[in-house]
Amino acid sequence: MSFNNRVFGCAIIKSINSNYNADFSHQPRTLPNGVVYATDKTLKYSIKNYLKDNYPDETVFYFKRLNENFNPLDLDAAYEHHFPSNKAATDKKTVAKDLLSCLDIRLFGATYANKKKKMAISIHGPVQINHGVNIWKENNIYSEQIMSPFSDEKKSDNKDSDEFEEKGATTLGRQAKLQEGHYLHHFSVNPKNIADLTALAGDGAMSLQSGDIDKLKEALRSGVTYFDSAAKSGTDNEFLLWVQLKADSKTVLPNFTELIKLEKTADKNVFDLSAVKEITDEIAEDIEKIEIYYISQSVDVKNAPGNATQFDINTRKTIK
């Protein structure tokens, strides 16, 4: 069934002694004022990775895959991999239908520019995610030395020699981490973003489905925690706010980045939703539902909208 409601919300990612989104120097990313942030791409990656692993029947197109030489597939090879029967297709409608059959493209859109096919298709994704900004008042980054168990061989100083000299010690490196961060990503969902393209592609082209939204919401609750790595160990999905408007509503909500405040008690992080409640109370007639998910063992929510249903982010059990 097609999904026709617009949604506004935010996902908060907790990072303790971890590096949620490093820059190319392997440091946590910072704004000019020193506040730590993460790009939208890192949250999208965790969502796509979660969907790829947990819903193998769905096609996730824009995700790195390797060939037999362990090199990433190019755009042509990726299209042939997913749609072998249409690998020679040069008709835009055929290609557009194929692309819209991919879950990640129905959610996030795509820019498909294929020189070999002399074809360019731009799909404006319904789901738009903003950069995540640390809403905790501290931005303490530290680095530590790490040691490899192997030495890094050094080429002989003799220019005429191709020999390598052994080193008497193993290789030292450094890794940087953030002491504590709570990255808030604002997001919105507007199904109309792909409505025109779906109509142009014709019969058989998929629009955004209710099942797609269920999977997106699941990945927004669990995708970052699921994607565990050495650098990201200690980074988890902490909080999700989902404000779903009625299908005929024309209301537009502001960015939630400045509206949610983080406080602390002795044993819990407390998210104050006073500013969100003030806005949602004013447009209560336009709202179909409000859902709030969080780690109940370490998080409390203060001043939540009165019509919100609260769930534990891990068990999905109702809290309030």
Image (cartoon, rainbow, N blue to C red):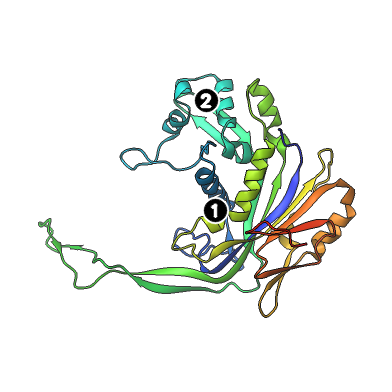
Asked whether 100 or 92 is in front, the reply is 100
Please say whether residue 181 is visible from this viewpoint.
yes
Residue 307's quadrant in the figure? bottom right
Identify the element where label 2 is drawn: strand
Residue carrying label 2 = 119
Going 74% across and 64% down the picture, which residue do you hit?
Answer: 260
Asked if residue 180 lies left or right of residue 316, the reply is left
Residue carrying label 1 = 42
Q: Where is residue 150 in the image (x, y as percent from the top left)?
A: 25, 66
Asked if residue 260 lies left or right of residue 78, the reply is right
Asked if residue 293 lies left or right of residue 57, the reply is right
Identify the element where label 1 is drawn: helix
Q: Where is residue 187 in the image (x, y as percent from the top left)?
A: 68, 50
C-alpha separation, residue under disc 2 versus residue under disc 1 = 28 Å
For residue 192, above or below residue 154 = above
Amino acid type, callout 1: Thr
